[in-house]
Image: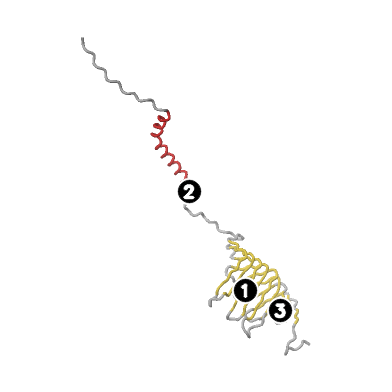
Amino acid sequence: MTPRPALPPPRPTRPAQPWWVRAWDVASLYLPVALMGTLALLTWAVVQRVPEDRPSPSRALGQGEPDYTLHGFTLQRWGVPGQPDLQLRGRRLVHYPADARTDIEQAHLQRVLPADGVRSTVQAQWLQTDDGRVHYTLRGQVRYERTPMRPGAAPRVTLDGEELTWDSERQLLQSARPVRITREGDVITANRLRYDERHGLAELRGQVRATLVARAGRQAPR
Protein backbone atom coordinates (compact mmCIF):
# COMPACT_ATOMS: atom_id res chain seq x y z
CA MET A 1 0.00 0.00 0.00
CA THR A 2 1.43 3.32 -1.16
CA PRO A 3 1.74 5.88 1.60
CA ARG A 4 -0.35 9.13 1.14
CA PRO A 5 1.75 12.35 0.93
CA ALA A 6 1.59 14.60 3.88
CA LEU A 7 -0.69 17.62 3.53
CA PRO A 8 0.84 21.14 3.92
CA PRO A 9 0.11 22.86 7.16
CA PRO A 10 -2.90 25.20 7.01
CA ARG A 11 -2.17 28.87 6.39
CA PRO A 12 -2.98 31.28 9.14
CA THR A 13 -6.15 33.20 8.40
CA ARG A 14 -6.18 37.04 8.76
CA PRO A 15 -8.98 38.42 10.78
CA ALA A 16 -11.53 40.36 8.73
CA GLN A 17 -10.76 44.15 8.73
CA PRO A 18 -13.46 46.77 9.35
CA TRP A 19 -15.07 48.31 6.28
CA TRP A 20 -13.71 51.78 6.90
CA VAL A 21 -10.14 50.41 6.95
CA ARG A 22 -10.67 48.74 3.59
CA ALA A 23 -12.25 51.93 2.21
CA TRP A 24 -9.28 54.05 3.36
CA ASP A 25 -6.85 51.65 1.70
CA VAL A 26 -8.68 52.04 -1.59
CA ALA A 27 -8.99 55.84 -1.26
CA SER A 28 -5.31 56.25 -0.41
CA LEU A 29 -4.42 54.75 -3.78
CA TYR A 30 -6.37 57.45 -5.69
CA LEU A 31 -5.94 60.37 -3.29
CA PRO A 32 -2.68 61.78 -4.86
CA VAL A 33 -4.28 61.68 -8.30
CA ALA A 34 -7.39 63.47 -7.04
CA LEU A 35 -5.33 66.16 -5.30
CA MET A 36 -3.25 66.82 -8.40
CA GLY A 37 -6.37 67.13 -10.51
CA THR A 38 -7.99 69.55 -8.04
CA LEU A 39 -4.83 71.69 -7.93
CA ALA A 40 -4.67 71.86 -11.72
CA LEU A 41 -8.35 72.89 -11.87
CA LEU A 42 -7.85 75.67 -9.29
CA THR A 43 -4.76 76.97 -11.11
CA TRP A 44 -6.67 77.18 -14.37
CA ALA A 45 -9.54 79.06 -12.70
CA VAL A 46 -7.17 81.63 -11.15
CA VAL A 47 -5.37 82.23 -14.45
CA GLN A 48 -8.70 82.84 -16.18
CA ARG A 49 -9.65 85.51 -13.63
CA VAL A 50 -6.35 87.46 -13.67
CA PRO A 51 -6.63 90.44 -16.08
CA GLU A 52 -4.14 90.62 -18.88
CA ASP A 53 -1.26 93.01 -18.38
CA ARG A 54 -2.02 95.32 -21.23
CA PRO A 55 -2.91 99.04 -21.10
CA SER A 56 -6.53 99.81 -21.78
CA PRO A 57 -6.94 102.26 -24.66
CA SER A 58 -7.81 105.73 -23.34
CA ARG A 59 -10.43 107.71 -25.20
CA ALA A 60 -9.53 111.25 -26.09
CA LEU A 61 -11.81 113.75 -24.40
CA GLY A 62 -13.97 115.81 -26.71
CA GLN A 63 -15.05 119.42 -26.49
CA GLY A 64 -16.99 120.22 -23.36
CA GLU A 65 -15.62 117.16 -21.49
CA PRO A 66 -13.51 118.02 -18.40
CA ASP A 67 -10.49 116.06 -17.27
CA TYR A 68 -10.31 117.40 -13.70
CA THR A 69 -12.18 119.60 -11.21
CA LEU A 70 -10.87 121.51 -8.18
CA HIS A 71 -12.88 122.87 -5.25
CA GLY A 72 -11.73 125.65 -2.91
CA PHE A 73 -8.38 125.89 -4.68
CA THR A 74 -5.42 128.31 -4.76
CA LEU A 75 -2.87 128.30 -7.60
CA GLN A 76 0.36 130.30 -7.63
CA ARG A 77 2.93 131.02 -10.32
CA TRP A 78 6.44 132.05 -9.28
CA GLY A 79 8.51 134.59 -11.16
CA VAL A 80 12.25 134.83 -11.72
CA PRO A 81 13.12 136.67 -8.46
CA GLY A 82 11.51 133.82 -6.48
CA GLN A 83 8.35 135.75 -5.64
CA PRO A 84 4.82 134.79 -6.69
CA ASP A 85 3.81 136.95 -9.66
CA LEU A 86 0.36 135.41 -10.16
CA GLN A 87 -2.17 133.94 -7.76
CA LEU A 88 -5.51 132.47 -8.78
CA ARG A 89 -8.10 131.15 -6.37
CA GLY A 90 -11.78 130.34 -6.49
CA ARG A 91 -14.62 128.16 -5.31
CA ARG A 92 -14.60 125.72 -8.23
CA LEU A 93 -12.34 125.11 -11.23
CA VAL A 94 -13.08 122.92 -14.25
CA HIS A 95 -10.52 122.27 -16.99
CA TYR A 96 -11.47 121.29 -20.56
CA PRO A 97 -8.40 119.93 -22.41
CA ALA A 98 -9.98 119.76 -25.88
CA ASP A 99 -10.99 123.43 -25.62
CA ALA A 100 -7.72 124.45 -23.91
CA ARG A 101 -9.71 126.47 -21.41
CA THR A 102 -10.45 126.70 -17.69
CA ASP A 103 -13.71 127.84 -16.09
CA ILE A 104 -13.67 129.19 -12.54
CA GLU A 105 -16.52 130.13 -10.21
CA GLN A 106 -16.08 132.95 -7.66
CA ALA A 107 -12.66 133.77 -9.08
CA HIS A 108 -10.02 136.03 -7.56
CA LEU A 109 -6.90 136.76 -9.62
CA GLN A 110 -3.87 138.76 -8.53
CA ARG A 111 -0.87 139.62 -10.69
CA VAL A 112 2.29 141.46 -9.65
CA LEU A 113 4.48 143.36 -12.13
CA PRO A 114 7.67 144.35 -10.25
CA ALA A 115 9.09 146.18 -13.28
CA ASP A 116 6.02 148.45 -13.42
CA GLY A 117 5.67 148.68 -9.64
CA VAL A 118 1.96 147.78 -9.71
CA ARG A 119 -0.31 145.00 -8.54
CA SER A 120 -3.44 144.11 -10.52
CA THR A 121 -6.38 142.33 -8.92
CA VAL A 122 -9.45 140.99 -10.69
CA GLN A 123 -12.46 139.26 -9.19
CA ALA A 124 -15.71 138.03 -10.73
CA GLN A 125 -18.47 135.50 -10.26
CA TRP A 126 -17.28 133.61 -13.33
CA LEU A 127 -13.90 133.60 -15.07
CA GLN A 128 -12.68 131.80 -18.17
CA THR A 129 -9.06 131.64 -19.31
CA ASP A 130 -6.90 129.75 -21.78
CA ASP A 131 -4.24 127.23 -20.79
CA GLY A 132 -1.52 129.86 -21.20
CA ARG A 133 -3.21 132.19 -18.66
CA VAL A 134 -3.06 135.04 -21.19
CA HIS A 135 -6.65 135.84 -22.16
CA TYR A 136 -9.32 136.22 -19.48
CA THR A 137 -13.08 136.68 -19.79
CA LEU A 138 -14.92 137.76 -16.64
CA ARG A 139 -18.64 138.04 -16.01
CA GLY A 140 -20.82 138.94 -13.05
CA GLN A 141 -19.88 141.65 -10.53
CA VAL A 142 -16.49 142.21 -12.11
CA ARG A 143 -13.99 144.41 -10.28
CA TYR A 144 -10.50 145.32 -11.46
CA GLU A 145 -8.03 147.17 -9.23
CA ARG A 146 -4.64 148.50 -10.21
CA THR A 147 -2.65 149.45 -7.10
CA PRO A 148 0.79 151.14 -7.04
CA MET A 149 3.50 149.35 -5.07
CA ARG A 150 6.01 152.20 -4.83
CA PRO A 151 5.90 155.99 -4.46
CA GLY A 152 5.55 157.98 -7.63
CA ALA A 153 3.74 155.24 -9.54
CA ALA A 154 0.41 155.72 -11.28
CA PRO A 155 -2.53 156.29 -8.90
CA ARG A 156 -4.91 153.53 -7.91
CA VAL A 157 -7.59 152.75 -10.50
CA THR A 158 -10.73 150.66 -10.01
CA LEU A 159 -13.05 149.36 -12.74
CA ASP A 160 -16.50 147.94 -11.97
CA GLY A 161 -18.83 146.27 -14.45
CA GLU A 162 -20.64 143.11 -15.45
CA GLU A 163 -18.33 141.90 -18.20
CA LEU A 164 -14.65 142.41 -18.94
CA THR A 165 -11.97 140.87 -21.16
CA TRP A 166 -8.31 141.07 -20.15
CA ASP A 167 -5.25 140.43 -22.30
CA SER A 168 -2.45 140.03 -19.74
CA GLU A 169 0.35 140.10 -22.35
CA ARG A 170 -0.82 143.30 -24.03
CA GLN A 171 -2.06 144.64 -20.65
CA LEU A 172 -5.31 145.61 -22.29
CA LEU A 173 -8.80 145.58 -20.74
CA GLN A 174 -11.97 145.94 -22.78
CA SER A 175 -15.68 145.94 -22.05
CA ALA A 176 -18.66 146.23 -24.37
CA ARG A 177 -21.02 146.84 -21.42
CA PRO A 178 -21.36 149.81 -19.03
CA VAL A 179 -18.47 150.29 -16.63
CA ARG A 180 -17.52 152.64 -13.82
CA ILE A 181 -14.00 153.94 -13.32
CA THR A 182 -12.78 155.32 -10.00
CA ARG A 183 -9.46 157.17 -9.87
CA GLU A 184 -8.36 159.32 -6.92
CA GLY A 185 -11.98 160.08 -6.05
CA ASP A 186 -13.02 160.82 -9.63
CA VAL A 187 -15.84 158.62 -10.92
CA ILE A 188 -16.47 158.13 -14.62
CA THR A 189 -19.12 155.93 -16.23
CA ALA A 190 -19.32 154.87 -19.86
CA ASN A 191 -21.10 152.36 -22.07
CA ARG A 192 -17.89 150.86 -23.45
CA LEU A 193 -14.28 150.82 -22.34
CA ARG A 194 -10.79 150.19 -23.65
CA TYR A 195 -8.10 150.57 -20.98
CA ASP A 196 -4.35 150.38 -21.60
CA GLU A 197 -2.69 149.25 -18.36
CA ARG A 198 0.84 149.92 -19.56
CA HIS A 199 0.21 153.62 -20.23
CA GLY A 200 -2.76 154.17 -17.91
CA LEU A 201 -4.97 155.44 -20.74
CA ALA A 202 -8.73 154.83 -20.88
CA GLU A 203 -10.77 155.16 -24.06
CA LEU A 204 -14.45 155.65 -23.22
CA ARG A 205 -17.32 155.41 -25.67
CA GLY A 206 -21.07 155.77 -25.64
CA GLN A 207 -22.74 157.85 -22.97
CA VAL A 208 -19.97 159.14 -20.71
CA ARG A 209 -20.53 160.86 -17.38
CA ALA A 210 -17.90 162.09 -14.95
CA THR A 211 -17.88 163.28 -11.36
CA LEU A 212 -14.57 164.97 -10.60
CA VAL A 213 -13.21 165.90 -7.18
CA ALA A 214 -11.90 169.47 -6.89
CA ARG A 215 -8.16 169.64 -6.23
CA ALA A 216 -5.69 172.41 -5.83
CA GLY A 217 -4.55 173.64 -9.20
CA ARG A 218 -7.56 172.24 -11.03
CA GLN A 219 -9.75 174.80 -12.70
CA ALA A 220 -13.49 174.44 -12.36
CA PRO A 221 -15.25 173.71 -15.63
CA ARG A 222 -17.01 176.71 -17.21
Residue drawn 66% across the image and 82% down it: 155
Q: CA distance from mark 3 to mark 1?
A: 19 Å
* Nearer-the-camera pick, 146 or 190: 146
| Local secondary structure at mark 2 | loop
Crowd class of label 1 (few under 14; some 14 to 19; many from 20; radius 10 Å): some
N-terminal of the two: label 3 or label 1? 1
Three-letter amino acid code at the position of disc 1: Gln
Give the colour scheme of this rendering.
secondary structure
Q: Relative to 39, does residue 116 appear above or below in the rendering?
A: below
The residue where tag 1 is placed is 110
Q: Relative to 176, does residue 62 appear above or below in the rendering?
A: above
Three-letter amino acid code at the position of disc 3: Thr
Q: CA distance from mark 1 to mark 2?
A: 52 Å
* Nearer-the-camera pick, 56 or 1: 1
Crowd class of label 3 (few under 14; some 14 to 19; many from 20; radius 10 Å): some
* Nearer-the-camera pick, 43 or 124: 43
| Local secondary structure at mark 3 | strand
Q: CA distance from mark 3 to mark 2?
A: 68 Å
Q: Which mark is residue 182?
A: 3
Front of the two marks 3 and 1: 1
Q: Along the horizontal axis of the image, is 14 left or right of 171?
A: left
Quadrant for the C terminus in the image: bottom right
Q: Which mark is residue 56?
A: none
* Nearer-the-camera pick, 146 or 210: 146
The residue where tag 2 is placed is 50
N-terminal of the two: label 3 or label 2? 2
Percent position of residue 210, x then y? 75, 80
